[in-house]
Amino acid sequence: MKKIYPNAATALDGLLHDGMFIAAGGFGLCGIPELLLSAIKDAGTKDLTFASNNAGVDDFGIGILLQTRQVKKMISSYVGENAEFMRQYLSGELELEFNPQGTLAERMRSGGCGIPGFYTKTGVGTVIADGKEHKEFPTGKNGAMETYIMENGIFADLAIVKAWKADETGNLVFRKTARNFNPPAAMCGKTCVVEVEEIVPTGSLDPDSIHLPGIYVHRIIQGDHEKRIEQRTTRPSASGETREKA
Amino acid sequence: MWDRNQMAARAAEELEDGWYVNLGIGIPTLVANYVGDKDITLQSENGMLGMGPFPFEGEEDPDLINAGKQTITEMDRTAYFDSAQSFGMIRGGKIAAAILGAMEVDEKGDLANWMIPGKLVKGMGGAMDLVAGVGRVIVVMDHTNKHGDSKLLKECTLPLTGKSVVDRIITNLGVLDVVDGGLKIVECADGVSEDELRAATEATIV
């Protein structure tokens, strides 16, 4: 079992093709697979469909692939931070499918679990429900019927994710809120490539503290991450213990 | 009339000891400043329970942000999880309340807060999941828009975030509940008469 590759380009070798469907982890710029995105840019793969909660900013994250027009379609919940995205979308160059954030996460998770569809209350009575199967279940008060819509699981050709640490067998540990979409994205890819800050020897991670088992992980690279902060927000140190804004 | 902070303080009164709560962006974020001694655990839907205040300068961590992508801190009680589990607890009704901003609310409790047709569409983020899943949806917003038109309508004109989802509305003019047949005035803001509140409200008041 050789999962470790020397760099992002070699880890993606043989996995990329035009028109493919990629699931990417990350929330905003937090926990995004920045090295793999950069390698996809260098590879020049085109007409990509991305399932990713956000689209990065103009010069970081998926934004760098928008600049090079490599993205055909985005499946996202929020794309507000990216001017180039908006320009391409409004001019019709880029397809966009909005998914409620929890629906997107569950679509990835369920796809990875072999569940091709599920019912959710999210989006009932909104444009999200248009054209989708509706079904009632007795989940309300005293068994009252409630309406749900069916959403499909995501089965991606490739998952690209970012974790904090991996062992040599691909067991992953994430750090704080950088976990976000990474585990569900990893699960829904036919192949999953992971970039980490540190590869540690097998046996050095506590088996009870592994967030995603290596069964989901096919290729691993270690590298230096920029980890850009999107909204640097602080409180004045003079305020000591008092709570500013949460 | 209440200002932003007074609206946030009033919204904080809605929260009960022991609740797990999700606060939206804008005025709802300020609610955290007014929970007082109540034991409230804040959820950040990007994968955290027990959200702490902003970090001191120099202590920002790029791996630790809230749903508004702002740097934050953790607390003793903090737990992290992935986005699927985060929305599992939202959809599963484990979050007692969400306090959200809105563009429009109508007398049936329909909520619009994510999209203005013809304008820049940024996306709904987690708003549709939250209003569909949490125990109680409390909207905090100005009573009228910048043209002076009521934001409490007979029927929402903007694309909906959720249908019949709002329980209570807190505005600069007062507090209203969504009940059968329309909105019910719970209280008027300081210095606001019931007549003034009615005059600023398009929705049916019962």
Image (spheres, coloured by chain):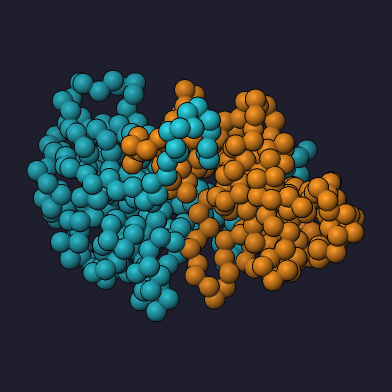
Name the residue: 57% across, 47% down: B24
Is there any visible trace of residue B129 in the rendered image? no
**What hue represents chain A?**
cyan
**Nearer-the-camera pick, B129 or B42:** B42
Asked if A175 appears above or below A159 in the picture, the reply is above
Looking at this view, name the residue that lies furthest to the front. A238
Residue A105 horizontal/vertical position (percent): 45, 47
Q: Is residue B194 left or right of residue A89?
A: right
Name the residue: 26% across, 68% down: A67
Residue A77 horizontal/vertical position (percent): 46, 57
Is there any visible trace of residue A70 in the rendered image? yes
Asked if B180 appears above or below A178 in the picture, the reply is below
Residue B54 horizontal/vertical position (percent): 45, 38
Name the residue: 63% across, 53% down: B101
Q: Is residue B106 left or right of residue A6?
A: right
The quarter of the picture where residue B57 lies is top left
Q: Is residue A58 left or right of residue B18?
A: left
Looking at this view, name the residue that lies furthest to the bottom. A91
Name the residue: 26% across, 64% down: A65
Asked if A19 appears above or below B18 in the picture, the reply is below
Please identify the quadrant where the N terminus of chain A is shown: top left
Chain that is orange in the image: B
**Nearer-the-camera pick, B126 or A97:** B126
